[in-house]
Amino acid sequence: MSRFLFVVPPLTGHINPAVGVAAELAGRGHRVAWACSDPALVRRLAGAGAEVFACAGAPEGSRPPELRGPEALRFLWEWYLLPLAEAMAPGVRAAVGEFRPDVVVADQQAFAGALVAERLGVPWATSATTSAEFTDPLAGLPKVREWVQERLALLRASVGDPAGRTDPRCSPHLVLAFSAPELAGPADGVRWVGPSVAARPAGAGFPWEWLDAGRTTVLVTLGTANTDVGARFLDVCVRALRERADRVQGVVVDPGGTLRAPVEDKDVLIVPSVPQLALLERGVGAVVCHAGHNTVCEALWHGVPLVVAPIRDDQPVVAGQVADAGAGVRVRFGRVDARRLGAALDAVLDGPGHRAAAERIGAAFRAAGGTPAAADHLEELAGELR
């Protein structure tokens, strides 16, 4: 049996896809461990018994919410991705030395996993939790591209193999992409495995009895990393949902507590979190979201069309994929009002085309194989390199 070390950033959307793959490998008798700067988060998502090697994390701070476009991307690299890699590297080196993995599985934003594995001569695979990198998002930003390449070269000199040439976001051994060409478009050298949709711990307390079988449920979520910018948009969503209360119920995820929820409300349920997979399996008519890759793919896996309002980072790329595939409608996060949002919601709820496209992509996702296919590829890599 082989040993697999998953190196992940402390971000729910990047850990969750790896959880199912790790569980599949463990179920086949392999030994699995994690390296992360937030062991408690890994254990909450992967199970209390997960073996986790602690790493240092990026410096405290937050990105100014008003940043968008290239400025937001540059700030993300400068404030978070590069400092995180430098901070994690010693812990990853220690984890590799103690755990002695056959393969390191490095998240695409956990550069330390790739660079340390490269330096120590350990085969590594990329866990691509978003397909945006395969579309060359910096194609129209040559100065940003040059700056990124320069910073990656400095990072490699510090924590990786100075003689190396491989981009730490794309392993030469194996790239696992948790999507499919039917949504993301073609890409060379990628193993498309579809979303990693697997059982995960779900907190108790969701009021399932609140759901009205006579009305369509609409889920509104901006993920776990956008509480600083979401208040206005969530309020717009609530207003659009109330205007359709005769046929729609809304479940609005508000982790920051920015909305005021009436004590008893039969039309809009405002909660800090939801068991998203369980809710999608129960039956949702549409999802309104920020075009986060995991949320989009989990909705489409269940054949649910979307209204997407991208905020920053990879979200505009993913939103474009959804719209181009016909599986949803794109709106402007910072400018949409209740009328326009309501019109987009009506389009995905009432027009059969969006749901048909969502179901087509969902079928492609399932055909890609999911977590068993990802585990097959990792086993093959480990076997080849013995």
Image (cartoon, grey):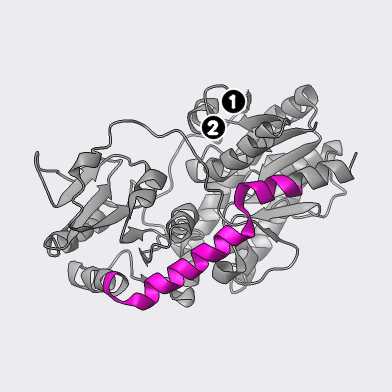
Q: Nearer the viewer, residue 162 or 270?
A: 270
Estimate the x, y position of residue 191 in percent, counting from the top left: 70, 59
Residue that label 2 marks = 46
Residue range (magenta): 349-377
Q: Is residue 6 left or right of residue 250?
A: right
Q: Amino acid under label 1?
A: Ala
- The residue shown at (30%, 54%) is 219
Residue 372 magenta-highlighted? yes
Q: Is residue 3 left or right of residue 133?
A: right
* Residue 221 to residue 53: above or below: below
* Residue 320 to residue 126: above or below: below
- Please say whether residue 202 is visible from this viewpoint: yes
Residue that label 1 marks = 50
- The residue shown at (64%, 31%) is 34
Quarter location, residue 283: bottom left
Quarter of the image for the C terminus: give it. top right
- Please say whether residue 83 is visible from this viewpoint: no
Quarter of the image for the N terminus: give it. top right
Marks 2 & 1, CB-CB < 8 Å contact: yes
Q: Nearer the viewer, residue 256 or 207?
A: 207
Residue neighbourhood size for the residue with mark 2, other residues' Cα within 10 Å, grouped as few (<14), some (14–19), many (≥20)? many
Q: Which mark is residue 356?
A: none
Estimate the x, y position of residue 3 in percent, counting from the top left: 76, 31
Residue neighbourhood size for the residue with mark 1, other residues' Cα within 10 Å, grouped as few (<14), some (14–19), many (≥20)? some
Q: Nearer the viewer, residue 72 or 44?
A: 44
- The residue shown at (73%, 35%) is 4
